[in-house]
Image (cartoon, helix red, strand yellow):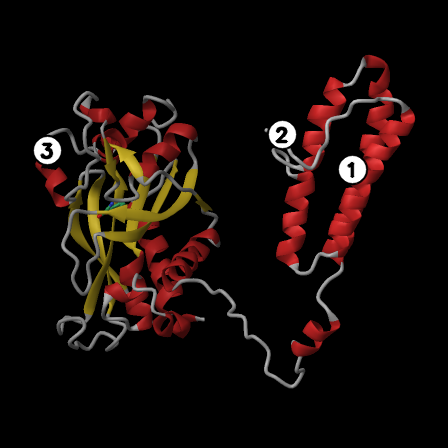
């Protein structure tokens, strides 16, 4: 495309070049002097310096390239000088700023109240999660994480839920579609619990292990006042030589007192999880009635809060495939898993789980 504003160059002696460039420079200066407003300045920039169709690009294409070899240097020097002038004019136009009249119109009234900026704060779930982590960090636990999209192997098989085993029905699962070509153990799903990170931890780290693992988990469940298909857990795993059931009891009793107050009592109830043996549900004395019995604890005085147990030897056997030190004859350990929403609801007296996810500032501001 040729630009009518750029004449063809016919002579290449210094006088002819000076004249041609002087004409362009005048054109640029006149245009710059007439600029008013940001839009005009931008149009000026595009017109002169535009990368594809700017005048200077055109000058470079048509004058420099067609020039005889011995005139190229003369042209180049003048071209660079012109470019510097145009860029200077643009800088000036950009720096000129608004007129005095415009400034007066928007003069600042220092007596007006300022703009209040909201300070961010931890979401109650994050806050509770961090409180739980802090309790265990003080006992020497480190913190780990694992993927939310997990394989069947880590979520189920290595946690001692064999393929087709009915225990899988206790955690109704959301699976990723179109994976028929993969072997069952490699099929992806949304993890139903944070327990798979027990295995991921043991595979990469020999004993002793003391770790807590916070994270989001998913189940194929209908939402109601106290259940959400997406929720959070904190997993715990402790493995060493001679870890006993009383270590588990003492650890969780301490943790519950740290979270809910030193007057809280704990008791363990027999339960079942494929990956722990024996397994237990931990109940705490009702924090609402102090154990006397009320509506919240269904008059029992106790509230069930988390699952736990001694790591099943079958789980250690899976870990030992990667880390021989997890020999169930030489080491032992316990694990526990708790729901963060449930703990947060108890601590803060929240009766609708959906409030955590609604993003309503009036709710969230209660926790700042
Ligand atoms: N993963 C179990 C659940 O989601 C909780 C649990 C973790 C139980 C560790 C025992 C040991 O229900």
Horizontal side, residue 33 vs residue 150: left or right: right
Q: Which mark is residue 83?
A: 1
Pick the residue in front: 179 or 143. Answer: 179
First along the sequence among labels 3 and 1:
1
Quadrant housing the C terminus: bottom left
Q: Position of residue 50 (x, y in %)?
A: 64, 38
Horizontal side, residue 85 vs residue 332: left or right: right
* Residue depicted at x 76% and y 60%: 96
Q: How many angstroms separate mark 2 from mark 3 (CA)?
A: 77 Å
First along the sequence among labels 2 and 3:
2
Quadrant housing the N terminus: top right
Residue at disc 3, secondary structure: loop
Q: How many angstroms separate mark 2 from mark 1 (CA)?
A: 19 Å
Q: Position of residue 199 (x, y in %)?
A: 33, 33
In the rendered view, would you say 144 is above or below 304? above
Residue at disc 1, secondary structure: helix
Pick the residue in front: 224 or 195. Answer: 224
User: Is residue 84 something that shows in the picture?
Assistant: no
Pointers 2 and 1 in contact (C-beta within 8 Å)? no
Q: Position of residue 317 (x, y in %)?
A: 27, 26
In the rendered view, would you say 204 is above or below 142? above
Q: Which mark is residue 165?
A: 3
Pick the residue in front: 91 or 235. Answer: 91
User: Is residue 289 something that shows in the picture?
Assistant: yes
Q: Mark 2 sits on what residue?
A: 2
* Residue depicted at x 71% and y 56%: 35
Could you classify mark 3 by the number of other residues whose Cα lies within 10 Å: few (under 14), some (14-19), or many (20 or more)? few
Of circles 2 and 1, which is in front?
A: 2
Is ligand 1 within 8 Å of the beta carbon of the residue shown at mark 1? no
* Residue depicted at x 36% and y 22%: 322
Of circles 3 and 1, which is in front?
A: 1
């Amino acid at each position: 495309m040729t630009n009518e504003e750029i004449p063809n160059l016919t002579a290449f002696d210094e006088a002819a070049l000076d004249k041609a460039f002087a004409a362009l420079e005048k054109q640029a200066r006149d245009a710059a002097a007439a600029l008013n407003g940001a839009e005009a300045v931008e149009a000026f920039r595009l017109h002169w310096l535009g990368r594809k169709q700017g005048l200077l690009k055109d000058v470079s294409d048509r004058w420099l390239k067609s020039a005889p070899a011995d005139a190229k240097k003369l042209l180049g020097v003048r071209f660079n000088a012109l470019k510097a002038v145009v860029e200077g004019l643009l800088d000036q136009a950009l720096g000129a700023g608004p007129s005095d009249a415009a400034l007066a119109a928007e003069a600042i009234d220092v007596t007006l109240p300022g703009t209040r900026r909201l300070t961010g704060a931890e979401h109650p779930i994050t806050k509770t999660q961090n409180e739980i982590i802090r309790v265990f960090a003080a006992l020497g636990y480190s913190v780990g994480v694992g993927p939310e999209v997990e394989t069947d192997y880590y979520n189920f098989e290595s946690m001692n839920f064999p393929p087709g085993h009915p225990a899988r029905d206790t955690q109704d699962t959301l699976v990723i579609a179109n994976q028929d070509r993969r072997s069952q153990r490699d099929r992806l799903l949304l993890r139903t619990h944070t327990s798979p990170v027990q295995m991921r931890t043991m595979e990469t780290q020999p004993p002793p292990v003391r770790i807590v693992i916070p994270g989001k988990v998913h189940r194929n469940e209908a939402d109601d006042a106290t259940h959400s298909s997406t929720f959070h857990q904190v997993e715990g795993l402790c493995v060493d030589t001679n870890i006993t059931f009383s270590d588990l009891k003492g650890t969780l009793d301490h943790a519950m007192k740290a979270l809910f107050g030193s007057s809280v009592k704990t008791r363990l109830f027999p339960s079942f999880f494929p990956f722990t043996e024996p397994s237990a549900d931990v109940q705490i004395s009702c924090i609402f009635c102090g154990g006397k019995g009320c509506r919240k604890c269904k008059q029992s005085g106790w509230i069930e809060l988390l699952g736990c147990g001694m790591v099943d030897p079958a789980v250690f056997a899976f870990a030992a495939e990667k880390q021989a030190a997890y020999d169930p004859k030489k080491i032992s350990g316990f694990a526990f898993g708790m729901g963060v929403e449930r703990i947060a609801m108890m601590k803060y007296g929240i009766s609708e789980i959906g409030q955590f996810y609604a993003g309503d500032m009036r709710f969230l501001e209660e926790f700042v």
